[in-house]
Image: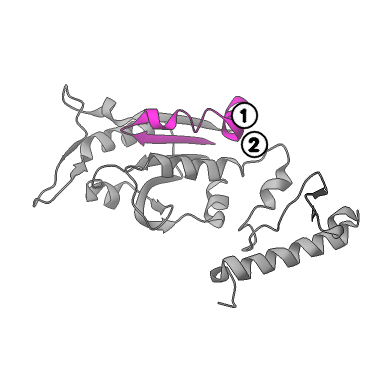
């Protein structure tokens, strides 16, 4: 898979893609991530990518031309399955959405900034708008990193134990069950006996029951019991 991220602040994305699962996936050739500076497509010597909004009002707006030129250059080199815009008013990122996106081959992510982007970009170039929550950040770089991370860890080979990704929270509309490790007792706090029994079937049943309990308690919106 290839993910191209268009941003006005590429420096913000250096660290998220230089460690852990994403770093290893890149080294294995499983994922190719390119962070592209939109200022490289600006028309003036100041590398301007924003301007005042028509009609007045506070805040600057990302200009149409640098974004158009960047996307057209990329599309001249390959076909893209999705051109995503990170926006607080987009559809909320979910595990199911991440699963779907992880099956694609080429994706562009446009990191929003300032007051937003010229609406004509959204109307004519963007194929999907994604939000990571009902709040506003200073820019779309962190949402772009989060979307990328959610996608990459699902690609076969990115995680050494692929079953780990399949048992994550939200994969089956349930939160993950509680987990424990050694020592089995600490300050009188004990690990549930069932987890020490070695009975795989009973352990899996216990985990499912606990996942259901946690989901009903912490995220009733994911169940039919709300």
Residue in the foreground of this view, choosing between 76 and 57: 57
Q: Can you say whether 92 is above or below 103 in the image? A: below
Residue 4 is covered by the magenta coloring? yes
Q: Residue furthest right?
A: 198
Q: Secondary structure at mark 1?
A: helix
State the mark number for residue 147.
none
Q: Residue furthest bottom?
A: 225
Q: Secondary structure at mark 2?
A: loop
Boundaries of the magenta span: 1-28
Q: Position of residue 184 (x, y in %)?
A: 83, 49
Q: Is residue 60 visible?
A: yes
Q: Position of residue 41 (x, y in %)?
A: 26, 28
Residue in the foreground of this view, choosing between 165 and 196: 196
Identify the residue at horizontal 68%, vertical 36% (top origin): 157
Displayed quadrant of residue 28: top right
Displayed quadrant of residue 139: top left
Q: Quadrant of the N terminus?
A: top right
Nearest to N terminus: mark 2 or mark 1:
1
Identify the residue at horizontal 48%, vertical 29% (top origin): 15
* Residue hosting label 2: 158
Displayed quadrant of residue 76: top left
Identify the residue at horizontal 86%, vertical 58% (top origin): 193
Q: Is residue 46 left or right of residue 201?
A: left
* Residue hosting label 1: 24
């Amino acid at each position: 898979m290839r993910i191209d991220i268009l941003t006005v602040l590429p420096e913000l994305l250096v660290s998220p893609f230089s460690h852990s699962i994403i770093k290893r996936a890149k080294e294995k050739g499983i994922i190719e991530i390119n962070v592209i500076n939109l200022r490289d497509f600006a028309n003036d010597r100041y590398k301007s990518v924003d301007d005042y909004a028509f009609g007045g009002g506070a805040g600057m707006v990302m200009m149409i031309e640098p974004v158009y030129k960047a996307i057209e250059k990329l599309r001249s080199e390959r076909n893209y399955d999705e051109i995503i815009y990170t926006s607080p008013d987009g559809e909320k990122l979910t595990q199911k959405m991440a699963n779907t996106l992880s099956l694609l081959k080429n994706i562009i992510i446009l990191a929003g900034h300032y007051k937003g982007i010229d609406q004509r970009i959204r109307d004519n170039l963007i194929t999907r708008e994604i939000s990571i929550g009902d709040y506003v950040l200073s820019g779309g770089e962190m949402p772009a990193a989060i979307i990328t991370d959610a996608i990459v860890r699902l690609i076969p080979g990115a995680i050494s134990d692929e079953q780990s990704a399949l048992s994550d929270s939200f994969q089956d509309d349930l939160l993950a069950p509680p987990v424990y490790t050694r020592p089995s007792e600490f300050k009188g706090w004990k690990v549930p006996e069932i987890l020490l029994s070695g009975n795989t079937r009973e352990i899996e049943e216990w985990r499912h029951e606990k996942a259901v309990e946690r989901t009903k308690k912490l995220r009733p919106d994911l169940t039919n019991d709300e």
